[in-house]
Structures are given as C-alpha cells and as structure tokens.
Image (cartoon, rainbow, N blue to C red):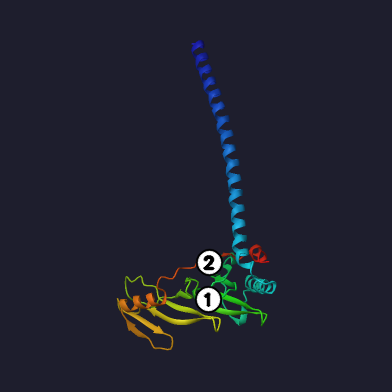
Amino acid sequence: MKKYWLAVLLSVSVLAAGCKGTTDKTDTAREAEAENKETEDQEKEALKTDGTKDAILAGAGTLSDAAKSAYRSVLDDIYYNQQFPNGLELDYNGSDLSENKYGVYDIDGDGRDELLIAYTTASADGQMFLIYDFVEALDAVHEEFTGFPAATFYDNGVVRADWSHDPSTVEGSDFQPFTLFIYDEEVNTYEFLGSVCQQDKPDVYYQTLAGGEETEIDETVLKDWLDFCIGDAGQIEVPMVELTEENIKALK
C-alpha cells in the first residue's frame, strides 16, 4: 500500500513537475506575447500620432505664418470658449470637445488651404460643418461655408449637405433631404444651388432651386438634376483630426 501511494505521489510529483515546466514555458510565452503586444501597441500609437501630424502638416505646409496663427486662434476660441468667428453662435452640449474635428485642406481648389471644422458637440440644430479661408489683405478669416456636418464634397466644387431634420411623414421612406451648394470663386463662398425633401407623398419630392419656389418633382427629374450637378465628379476625402490641445498646437 505504501508503495502504491508512493507511486501515486511520484506520479503526481512528475505530473506537477511537468505542469510546472509547462507553466513556466507558458508564462514565458505569455510574457513574450505581452511584450510583443506592448511593442505593437506602441508602434501603432506612434504611427497614429505621426499620421495625425501628417494630416495636419500636409495642409499647413502651404500656409503663411499669419494664416496658421489665424487658424490656431479660431480653433483656440472654439476649444476653450466655444466662440466662433464673425459672431456665429452655436450651442454646446457639454460633450468632450475632442469629438469635434478639424482639417487644413484646399477643399475648393483655389490654391489656398482652408480651415475645415466639423462641430458636433451641440444639439442637432447647432451642429455644423464650417469652412474658413484666411484673407491676407484683411488679415482675417472669411467664412466660406456653413452646413450640417453630414456633408459630401466633390471635386467639381459641389457640396451635398444633408439636413439635420427630416420633415417627411412618408412611412418606410429612407430618403434623406439635402441641399446642394457650389463654390463661387468670385465671392469666395459656397452658393446655394437647390434643396430637395419629401413631405407627405411617396415618390414625390419637393425641390427648391436658387431664386425659385418649391416645386413638386418625381424621381426622374431628381436623378437628372443630380446627374447635371454632380455627374461623375469624385468625392473628396478630407484628412481630419480630433480637436485637441495637442492637435491645435501641431498647427505651427
């Protein structure tokens, strides 16, 4: 019996030793994996940081010192005081301000880099996509565009800006009302082209063109209008970064 229990104990000891060896190996492997993961995370973070800076500096590289200073001032006022240029008033819902984004990019193709801001820390009515251009002669920023953040920019100068509210009462409709704008280089602003929404009838749209009154149109007319205004123009992917103190300071 003693030999039996001794054999059992030896077996248990051998198994324990084997398990310990395996455990040591597993722990070592786990430590190595943890170190590798930490290294990978650090590399990803470095790439993310570098990418963020690259996104900012890609546009800022063509700006004059005066323009950079003006754009930083705009961002500082928004970030610290929730104040906007030219007396524009937008509310603030108390959310983390880094949820907002900004970019520096020649969005209108005029050869100058604009300041683009997606301000979303507000009520639906207070959310805006803003574009500012620095005018050297005035030593000030000029507002080119304000619209709801759900805006799509095209390389032919057209912007499609979705509405913050949908007035439609048509059940089952997934149509998103929108407004089209187009950049006018002479006045350096995006001018109203027209808007389209649904209200209470399926397959019927209500269109308002610049200088005109609201008109009922069908899907064919709507498609023809969009083809005329946008056609095969490509969408512009604007590099945007979070509105943070670090990213604002990177604009230098």
Q: Which amino acid does the dot numbered 1 rest on?
A: Gly
Q: Residues within 10 Å of mark 1 (few under 14, many from 20)?
A: some
Cα–Cα span, label 1 and label 2: 22 Å
Residue 238, which numbered label? 2
The residue wearing badge 1 is 126
Which label's residue is closer to the chain start, 1 or 2? 1
Q: Please, what secondary structure does the residue beneath circle 1 have?
A: helix
Quadrant that contains the C terminus: bottom right
Relative placement, left or right, of 214 versus 79 is: left
Q: Residue at x 56, y 23 (%)?
A: 17
The correct choice, above or below, for 33 with respect to 207 in the image is above
Q: Residue at x 33, y 83 (%)?
A: 216
Tell me where residue 132 sits by quadrant.
bottom right
Q: Please, what secondary structure does the residue beneath circle 2 have?
A: loop
Q: Which amino acid does the dot numbered 2 rest on?
A: Val
Nearest to viewer (mark 1 / mark 2): 2
Whole-percent x, y for residue 107 in the image: 54, 72
Viewer-side residue, 26 vs 188: 188
Viewer-side residue, 87 vs 195: 195
Residue 165, which numbered label? none
